[in-house]
Every structure is written in structure tokens, then in C-alpha cells.
Amino acid sequence: MKRPEGKVAGGALGSLPAVDEAWVKKYPTILSYLCDETYDDGGARVTSALSITIREGDFLLALNDKDLDQSVYTQAHTLTEGLKLMEEAIREGKAQWRPWKKGKKK
């Protein structure tokens, strides 16, 4: 995974899970966020988390980038459609990443 400009990351290295080859072919960018523990320059990074929620018949997906403290969201009628939308947006650089609000109490 390529390190974003200006980011000095820290993270713990661990072991990668067994990965479904079909998933690798369909969603390589999302998988990279979920599994890559280092940037292209060798620096450590914290892996991301993918959250899936179903609300009112739609799938709501959130890819939470724990290394950069930001998330990207998609919503679709099917899980496959939501993953495809997210993959394309991130790969094409069109994803609207939302920074996390730190220190704000509810």
C-alpha cells in the first residue's frame, strides 16, 4: 500500500488471514486497506476495519482507516453493489473520506 503524503504511521505487525481469491480479484483495494500492515516504503500501518449494517433494506458499509483516522461510506441495495461502489470510488481516487472527530464528547 502506498503511504499518503505527509503521513508518518505507526502500527503493529501481525499475521495476515487466509484470503478468498474471488474477493482478491473483485475488491483488491478494499482488501489492501484491511490487510496491508506496511506502506510501500516499509513503514508500519494500522489495518482498517470494514463495518456492514443493514437498515431499511439497504446495506450501509463503512471502511474505517485506523491509521489515518478517517472513514468512507457507501449505501446500496445489495452487499455486492455496496462493495463494488466502495472499491471503485477508492481505486479511482473519488472516495469522500471523512476525518474522525477526536476529543468531541456526545
Image: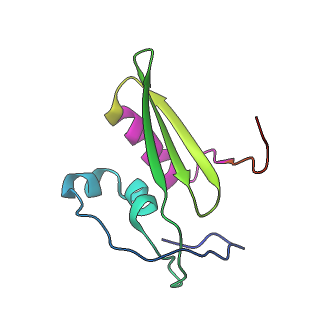
Whether residue 92 appears in this view of the structure is no
| Main secondary-structure element of the magenta-colored stretch | helix
| Residue at the image point whose x is 48% and y is 29% from the top | 75
User: On the rendered structure, is 101 left or right of 54?
Assistant: right
- In the rendered image, the residue lying farthest to the right is 104
Give above or below for 40 relative to 83.
below
The image position of residue 44, as x and y in percent, is 53, 78
Toward the viewer: 95 or 39? 39
Give above or below for 17 relative to 7.
above
User: On the rendered structure, is 96 left or right of 80?
Assistant: right
User: On the rendered structure, is 28 left or right of 22?
Assistant: right
The image position of residue 85, as x and y in percent, is 44, 39
| Residue at the image point whose x is 49% and y is 75% from the top | 12
Q: In the rendered view, how is the structure colored?
A: rainbow
Toward the viewer: 65 or 2? 65
Give above or below for 87 relative to 39.
above
The C terminus sits in image quarter: top right
Whether residue 32 appears in this view of the structure is yes
- In the rendered image, the residue lying farthest to the top is 56
| Residue at the image point whose x is 20% and y is 58% from the top | 21
The image position of residue 58, as x and y in percent, is 42, 21
Region of the chain picked out in magenta, as a range:
81-98
Residue 92 lies within the magenta run: yes
Residue 83 lies within the magenta run: yes
| Residue at the image point whose x is 21% and y is 56% from the top | 20
The image position of residue 30, as x and y in percent, is 42, 54
